[in-house]
Amino acid sequence: MNEKLLSQEDDVKKAAELVSSIGIPSQPSLLLEINKKISRPETGIGDIADLISRDVAMSAKLLKMANSAFFGLREKVDSIQRALALIGLKNFNRIILATSLRDSVGGHGSGTEKFWNHSMTVAGASAYIAKKTGFESEEQAYIAGLFHDCGVPMLMKKYPDYPQILDHALGVVNSASLSGIKKSIIGIEEERYNTHHCAVGYLITKSWHLPITIAKSVWYHHYINIDIHNDPVTKRLSAILLLADYIGGHILYLGGSDCPVETEPEWARMHRKAATELCMNAESIKDMKDDLVEKLYG
C-alpha cells in the first residue's frame, strides 16, 4: 500500500472520530430520491412534482421561491408543478441542495454566514468555469464548489477557537499568503485539532452519496499538484475548484481594506498545472474573475 493511501486512511480515521462526537449529517432521503430521478433523461417535471408534494417542508420552500420578488409574478403560484416549471429543474436542484446542506450542518453567527457566502460564491464560480472551459458537467462542478468547505462548520461546532482561522480555511488570502508565507490551513488544523476540514468534508460527501469525483476534489481542494489524480475528470474538476476557490476568496475581500490587487500572475505561477489543465493564463483568469464580479455586483 502506498504512502499517500496510508496517510489518507489515517486522516479519515481521525476525521471520523471527530464527527462521531458531533453526528455526521446525511443527505435527506427525499433529496436523494429527487437527485436519482433528475439524473434520468426520461424524468419530467410532473415526476419531480409528485415527489416534492410528499414533503410539506420542501413544498413550502419551493412555493416560497416561486412567489419571491425575484420572479415578479402578478398572480400567486400555488401549484408545485407550475413552481417547478417557473424555476426550472436545474435551479431547483441547486437551491434545494444548498438549503438542505445548510439545514444539515447547522451553525449560526457571522462566521457561519461568511462560510455560506463563500460556499455559494465558489459553487457559482465552479459552474461558470466549467461552462467556459468545456467541462462535461456544470452540475458536478457546482456541487463540488458547494461542498468543498462543508467540513468547516463541523469544526466550528466542535472548537470555539476555530473562527480565528476561518478566513484562512475559506481561502480568503492576500498576496503574502498566496506566496506561501503563511502555513497551510491543513497544517494549522492538524496541529490544533488532529484533523482537517478537507477530511471531514470528504466524509460528508460520502455520507451524501455524492460521486467519487466530487468526494476526491473536496478532499484535495487545497492541493496544488493536480497530477495526483489519475482520473482525468477528477483532475479537471480539481483544477476548476482551485480556481473557483481563489476567485471566491477574492470576492469575499471586496469592499475590504486588504483587497488583493493583481494576484492573478502569482496564482497562475503557483498553480501552473491547474492553469494549464484549464488552458488559462493570468490574463484570462483576471478576465474570468472580473466577469464573475460583474455578474454578482454589476
Image (tube, rainbow, N blue to C red):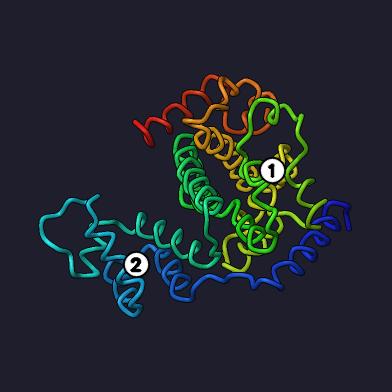
Alpha-carbon distance for marks 1 and 2? 37 Å
Q: Tell me the amino acid under the disc marked 1.
A: His
Seen from the viewer's position, the closer of residues 135 and 73 is 73
Q: Residue 93, position in %: x, y? A: 39, 60
Which residue is under mark 2?
43
Q: Is residue 223 above or below residue 281?
A: below
Q: Residue 222, position in %: x, y? A: 69, 43
Q: Residue 164, position in %: x, y? A: 67, 46
Q: Is residue 37 above or below residue 6?
A: below
**Figure quadrant of the N terminus:** bottom right
Q: Tell me the amino acid under the disc marked 2.
A: Thr
Which residue is under mark 1?
222
Q: Residue 82, position in %: x, y? A: 20, 64
Q: Earlier in the sequence, mark 1 or mark 2?
A: 2
* Mark 1: secondary structure: loop
> Is 282 situated left or right of 190 in this image?
left
**Figure quadrant of the C terminus:** top left
